[in-house]
Image: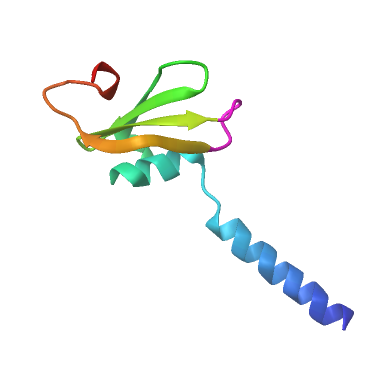
């Protein structure tokens, strides 16, 4: 029984470890990019604007940055305009 419980815990940990990503990778995926295709601009202590692949969005992040949540929608970038200017 202890062996089965140990195997279950190891399998669960492996599943959890494979699903984890950094906030920057998750944000890049929101925009349809990879992390190298994005640029980040800090707007305030916990708010960041991320641009990439012709799209932009604002995120609220914990500090130090461990997790982020999108604030509002994802917008297409038009003629150099940033979402913060809207």
Above or below, comparing residue 69 to residue 46 in the picture: below
Place of residue 9 in the rendered image (x, y in percent of width and height, measured from the top left): 75, 69
Which stretch appears magenta?
A: 62-67
Q: Return the residue found at the far right.
A: 2
Q: Does residue 12 sit above or below 45 in this rendering?
A: below
Residue 65 in the magenta stretch? The answer is yes
* Marker count (numbered): 0
Q: As rendered, which of 74 and 21 lies closer to the eye? A: 74
Question: Residue drawn at (61%, 26%), measured in percent from left and top?
Answer: 64
Secondary structure mainly formed by the magenta segment: loop
On screen, residue 49 above or below 36: above
Q: Is residue 85 left or right of residue 50?
A: left
Residue that appears at 38% across and 39% down: 35
Q: Is residue 85 above or below residue 68?
A: above
Residue 3 in sight from this viewpoint:
yes
Q: How is the image coloured?
A: rainbow
Q: Which quadrant, please, contains the C terminus? A: top left
- Outermost residue on the left side: it is 79
Task: Report whether residue 34 is seen.
Answer: no
> Residue 47 location in percent, x, y?
45, 23
Relative depth, front residue between 41 and 34 = 41
């Amino acid at each position: 029984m202890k062996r089965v419980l140990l195997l279950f815990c190891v399998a669960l940990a492996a599943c959890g470890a494979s699903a984890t990503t950094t906030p920057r990778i998750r944000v890049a995926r929101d925009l349809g990019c990879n992390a190298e295709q994005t640029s980040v601009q800090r707007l305030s202590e916990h708010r960041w604007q991320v641009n990439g692949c012709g799209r932009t969005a604002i995120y609220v992040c914990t500090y130090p940055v461990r997790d982020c949540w999108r604030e509002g929608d994802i917008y297409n970038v038009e003629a150099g305009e940033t979402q913060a200017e809207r």
